[in-house]
């Protein structure tokens, strides 16, 4: 007997990827329901290689009888409808930022803190972390277990898909406009994104950090260890899919680059591609469409007592969002929501 799964925000970039991932991984669902706003009701979305689903309106949908809801409709929408779904008995795995720092909601990356899923029953909601946080903590986890991470300094190079389909369209339209000598229009970003980089993701906070940088700090603490200090600079770059991160880590114990590579090679969800030669590293373009977090450019940092620097990339729509949510669902049904045959 399979599960009944609803995907909220099914017409968005992450929603499309959630449906694709459910099909690719053969998630045991007898019924998959696509939900979106009232204006998208009646539209069709792809599910698997040969199926389409007709979109139903989230606003009026009755979640009674739905086992799992994968939500990515935007934080304000999740704030209203995720608790409604949870109250009806649906376990919500929410990809938005709204519930992440709620102390009664587990914030989960299965390769890092799968045991936290057991706390889902407090609210019937599990939070999916920020895309840039997910790939960072997947890379940090085996190192932290071995040598205890003290401090992380990270600069992100985040693709426009992290801001949604309209942002991807803006990069395309601006690039085309520049090539044909037309005026460049800005709607989704504060400055031109084509042939540019923007050190500004989400709103500014009182201390000068952006909310994206704040998310990386507080989410890493909640997921991995509250004693880890994180200093982040988050930058939007003119790439469609895939986030890169330049990471510098200070440890409490010695850890060589060779030891780090060996730890990563045994770690779930990590692939090391680190050759000190042309093309001996992974770029966001190569990570697009792939599941792992790729680690490259590993080297010791001699400016601190125990330090390493590395580069990591991942597909932000897959591991940074949809895949992580589906992996949470897989762990959930494997341990907590087992159905009778």
Image: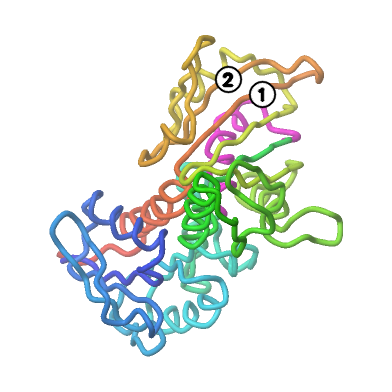
Q: Secondary structure at mark 1?
A: strand
Q: Answer above or below: position of 57 versus 219.
A: below
Decide whether residue 211 is among the magenta residues: no
Tag 1 and tag 2, C-beta contact below 8 Å:
yes
Which residue position is annotated with label 2?
297
Image coordinates of residue 200 in percent, x first then y, are 71, 52
Q: How is the image coloured?
A: rainbow
Judging depth in this view, the residue of 4 and 42 nearest the camera is 42
Image coordinates of residue 206 in percent, x first then y, are 85, 61
Q: Name the residue furthest bottom.
A: 60
Residue under the point 38% across and 40% down: 291
Image quadrant assignment for residue 37: bottom left
**First of labels 1, 2 by sequence position:** 2
Residue under the point 72% across and 62% down: 203
Q: Name the residue furthest right.
A: 207
Judging depth in this view, the residue of 200 and 98 nearest the camera is 200
Decide whether residue 147 is among the magenta residues: yes
Image coordinates of residue 314 in percent, x first then y, are 48, 39
Query: What span is in magenta?
Result: 130-152
Which residue position is annotated with label 1?
309
């Amino acid at each position: 007997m399979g599960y009944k799964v609803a995907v909220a925000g099914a017409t968005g970039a992450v929603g499309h990827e959630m449906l694709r991932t459910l099909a690719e991984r053969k998630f045991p669902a007898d019924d998959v329901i696509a939900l979106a706003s009232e204006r998208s009701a009646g539209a069709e979305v792809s599910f698997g290689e040969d199926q389409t689903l007709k979109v139903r309106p989230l606003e009026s949908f009755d979640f009674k009888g739905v086992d799992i809801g994968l939500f990515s409709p935007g934080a304000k929408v999740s704030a209203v409808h995720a608790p409604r779904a949870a109250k009806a008995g649906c376990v919500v795995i929410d990809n938005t930022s709204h519930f992440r720092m709620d102390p009664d909601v587990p914030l989960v990356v299965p390769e890092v803190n799968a045991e936290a899923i057991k706390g889902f029953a407090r609210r019937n909601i599990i939070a999916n972390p920020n895309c840039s946080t997910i790939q960072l903590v997947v890379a940090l986890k085996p190192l932290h277990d071995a040598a205890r991470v003290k401090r992380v300094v990270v600069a992100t190079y985040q693709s426009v898909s992290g801001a949604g389909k309209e942002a991807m369209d803006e990069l395309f339209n601006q690039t085309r406009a520049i090539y044909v000598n037309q005026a460049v229009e800005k709607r989704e970003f504060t400055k031109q994104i084509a042939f540019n980089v923007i050190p500004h993701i989400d709103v500014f906070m009182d201390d000068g950090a952006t909310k994206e940088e704040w998310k990386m700090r507080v989410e890493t603490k909640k997921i991995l260890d509250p004693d880890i200090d994180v200093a982040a600079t988050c930058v939007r770059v003119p790439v469609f899919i895939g986030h890169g991160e330049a990471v510098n880590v200070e440890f409490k114990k010695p850890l060589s680059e060779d030891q780090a590579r060996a730890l990563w090679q045994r770690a779930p969800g990590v692939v090391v591609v680190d050759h000190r030669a042309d093309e001996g590293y992974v770029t966001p373009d190569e990570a697009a469409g792939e599941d792992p977090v790729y680690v490259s450019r590993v080297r010791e940092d001699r400016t601190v007592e125990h330090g390493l620097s590395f580069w990591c990339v991942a597909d932000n729509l897959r591991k940074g969002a949809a895949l992580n949510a589906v992996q949470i669902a897989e762990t959930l049904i494997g341990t907590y929501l087992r159905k009778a045959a």
